[in-house]
Structures are given as C-alpha cells and as structure tokens.
Image (spheres, helix red, strand yellow):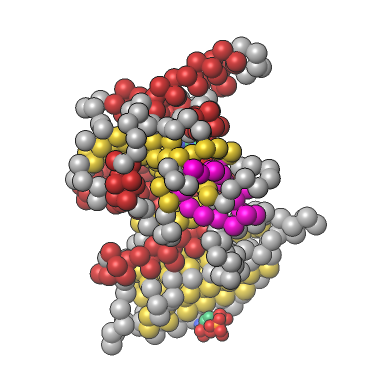
Amino acid sequence: MIKAVILIGGPMKGTRFRPLSLDLPKPLFPVAGFPMIYHHIAACSKVPNLQEILLIGFYRHLEPLKKFIAECQQEFKVQIRYLLEYTALGTAGGLFLFRDQILIDNPKAFFVMNADVCGDFPLLEMLNFHKENPAGSYGTILGTEATRQQSLRFGCMVEGKATHEVLHYVEKPETFISNIINCGIYLFNPEIFQAIETAFKKNAKDSYKLDDPVQSREMIRLEQDIFVPLAGSGKLFICHTNKFWSQIKSAGAAIYANRHYLAIYNKTHPDRLAVNSEDSPKIIGDVYIHPTAQVDPTCVVGPNVTIGKNVKVKAGVRLRESIILEDAVLQDHSCILYSIVGWNSIVGAWSRVEGTPNDPNPNKPFAKLDIPALFTDDGRLNPSITVIGSKVHIPPEVIILNSIVLPDKDLNSSYKNQIIL
Ligand code: GDD
Ligand code: GTP
C-alpha cells in the first residue's frame, strides 16, 4: 500500500501571490479550471494501490479545504484528510508530527509533494525507479535540469552518474553547484523517519542555545536538516524527468502553469477543451470554459484561456493567455490579455486589461520561469501580468496595463504599471 502527503503550507506563505491568496488558500487557486492541488491528487489517483492522501498545513480557515476534500474524495474514490499543524513546522516538521498517521496501515512507501509546483507528475516512473534502489535506501527525489543561473533558486544535487545517488545536496546555493534541481516531489520509505528523528533531536538540543525556543525546536526542514546530512550516504537517489515542471510562486506563474495544464488536457482530457462550432465563440488553441459560463458567440477566445464557473463574457470580447475566475463579468468588447480577473469582478465595455508575460527564454534549453522582483531597483513596478483582485469594478473604456489591483476597488480611470491599493 502506498500513501501521499501534500505539503500545503499556510497563510504566511504565498505573499507573492497576493491579492489572489487573500480570498482563498493559495493551494486551492484554480489553474486550468481546477485547484492547484487537484492536479496533484489526480496524478496520485493514477498510482495503483495509493490508498490515502494527507494534506499537511497550517491553514485554520477550514471551510474551503473541507469542501475541496469532499469533492475530490467523491471524484477520485480515495481517502483524503487534512492534518493541521499548530504552527509552521517546516517541510519535514509536519511529516514528523503526523508520522503515526502516515505510517498507520503500514504503507510500503509514501509520496511527498510540494503544493506550489505543477507538472506532468511522473509518479509511476518514480515508483518504478524507486523499486530498483538498493535495500536500506530512504528515498527518491524527482530531479530536473535548470540553467546554471536559475539553479541557484532551488535545491541543487550532485549525482553519482552510475548509481543516481545524491552525493551532495545544497539548498539554494550562493554559487553554482549543479544544474540538477530538486522538484519538490519525493518518494520515501518509512525508514526516512529515522533521519527525521535524528534531525529533530539535534534541533531540540541546539535550540536551547537559540533565542526562540518554541519555534526553532520543532522546525525541521527536509532540505537542510535531512537531505544535506544524508547526501553521500547511499540513502537518497535521483529520478530524472524531462517532462513539464514548474513552480507556482507568483500570479504570472499561474498563467504559465495554466497554459501547460491545458496542453496536457489534449492527451488526458480532450473533453475539457472547448471546440469551434457554429454557435460557439471562436476558439483559438487550448481553452477551458466551465460548463456554467456564458460566452457570447461573437467572442474570440484563446490561446491558453480558462473561464471559470458562472462567468459572463459579453459580445465581442477578446481573451488571450488569461484566467477569468468564478462569477466575473466581462462587458461588451472588452479585451483581456495576459491577465487574471478575480472572483466577482466586472470589466466595463470597451476596456482593455493587459499584462506582460515573463515566460522562460525559449532559446535556452531547460530554462525555468523567472520570478522577477515586484519592483525594479529604482522603485518602479516590474512589468508583469495584470492581476485584478476580487470584486473589483473596472469602468468602460479604460486601459489597465501591467498593474495589480487589490480587492473591492472601484476604479475610475486608466492605470499603467501600478499597484492599486
Ligand atoms: N505543512 C507545511 N508546513 N508545509 C510547508 C511549510 C510548513 O512549515 N513550509 C513550507 N511548506 C510547503 C509549501 O507550501 C510548499 O508547498 C513547499 O512546502 C515548499 O515550500 P518552501 O519552503 O517555500 O520551499 P521552496 O518552494 O522555496 O523550495 C522547495 O521547493 C523547490 C521546488 O519547487 C525546496 O524543496 C527546493 O529544494 C526545491 O527546489
Ligand atoms: P501577435 O499575435 O502577438 O502578433 O499579436 P496581435 O497583433 O494579434 O495582437 P495583440 O497581442 O495585441 O492582441 C491579441 C488579440 O486581441 C488580437 O488578435 C486582437 O485582435 C485582439 N485585440 C487587441 N486589442 C483589442 C481590443 O482593444 N479589443 C478587442 N476586442 N480585441 C483586441
């Protein structure tokens, strides 16, 4: 029997995702029509004999999670539970706290997945790879290649080429170590808890020397506290993937993830993609339209657009590379490009909402999405996608360019490169 754990974090995280994470825990933000971690659960549901999925985090606002879990349990016929950490315990602290829950029913192995990554999760490949690890091994880390420069933003691993063993692990190194990066997807044997317990005991001892005894004692970081000491001991192995993988740290990354998940639907769920017909809007490329959304047949939609539940898209609207969230209204002839329009927001007639993509450089092999700082060195907003928070009202005939609009704003003019508070 196999289990899976998804590390969903809590409300302190996801600050780069504001204002969208003000309304909903970031792991539930919809990408390609479904919450971010729905895609993780869908991937887990394809693993034979995977019987339970545990979400570990410290979100206290339980309603959205409960509703999501109930819907997923019904759809995937797998047990899902949310285990609440009393505070941020780090990427291994929650695993340690809930070790008995994880180990109940004696799983042979368990997946651990960071919530804020997306991809064509190769869980079956990992399982097959993991079976070949030598006896006594603790786990398999999914690795992928990044550019030299970008690797510094991730966990970096030096690999024993013949054995695929992790020889050396450095989390977010200051200088180049290796271009094989940690994807935040793991498959562990129960024996990993021996290493976590060792780290726990060491931290507990060390923490008496620190100022903040409560927090630091129980905080265990999978990367620094477990992988670093285990590297070179023949216990951790790297399973490589060339398939699509990205982090979702910012709103711009959600647009990028949206595009890739829609592309994956061509293979896995072609029924989810809109098609051209006589009385439908003109569809270009991959588009997901929720069955309850109303899109006028005079609209032009795509490529890479997701239109959420109950959205109303009026005559002549143009949509491209964007996510329109539940209950939004796009009035006649508005144009939305590289943007996210928040829940219940209204875009006025003939208005234009436009952002700037920051896609990876297509000429650099293995380039990942860059997450540019919000501001430039001279204090100006870095051009990025436009994000309209929830319940925002955009009047007719204005242009909102490269801006971030916080929830509940009633705008009365055009804006360019601004955060509208
Ligand atoms: N339950 C819980 N408790 N989850 C947590 C906590 C915690 O205290 N802290 C972080 N997480 C979750 C986050 O929600 C996220 O899904 C994941 O753990 C990793 O979060 P970060 O700590 O922000 O790390 P990171 O994303 O910068 O880097 C990690 O992921 C990279 C791949 O995306 C590292 O594992 C890197 O090595 C890796 O390359
Ligand atoms: P490329 O394909 O990159 O060459 O761009 P484009 O010249 O097609 O136009 P752009 O990326 O600026 O806009 C994307 C689409 O939106 C175009 O097909 C335009 O027809 C449409 N579009 C642009 N501005 C407006 C607008 O103000 N209103 C409406 N309704 N559609 C617009």
**Residue 154: x and y, percent?**
57, 46
For the point 52% across and 77% down, the residue is 335
Q: Is residue 418 left or right of residue 364?
A: right
- The magenta segment is 142-160
- Which quadrant of the rendered structure holds the N terminus? top left
- Number of numbered discs: 0
Q: Which of 19/312 is in front? A: 19
For the point 61% across and 12% down, the residue is 208
In what quadrant does ligand 2 lie?
bottom right
Q: Is residue 156 left or right of residue 95?
A: right
Indicate yes or no whether the magenta region holds residue 150: yes
Q: Is residue 307 left or right of residue 223?
A: left
Could you tell me if residue 262 is visible in this image? yes
Q: Which of 181/326 is in front? A: 181
Q: Is residue 378 left or right of residue 310?
A: right
**Residue 287: x and y, percent?**
38, 72
**Residue 266: x and y, percent?**
32, 70
For the point 46% across and 79% down, the residue is 317
**Residue 138: x and y, percent?**
38, 31
In the current view of this chain or complex, which residue is farthest to the right? 378
Could you tell me if residue 9 is visible in this image? no
The answer to which image quadrant residue 204 occupies is top right
Indicate yes or no whether the magenta region holds residue 159: yes
Q: Which of 300/27 is in front? A: 27
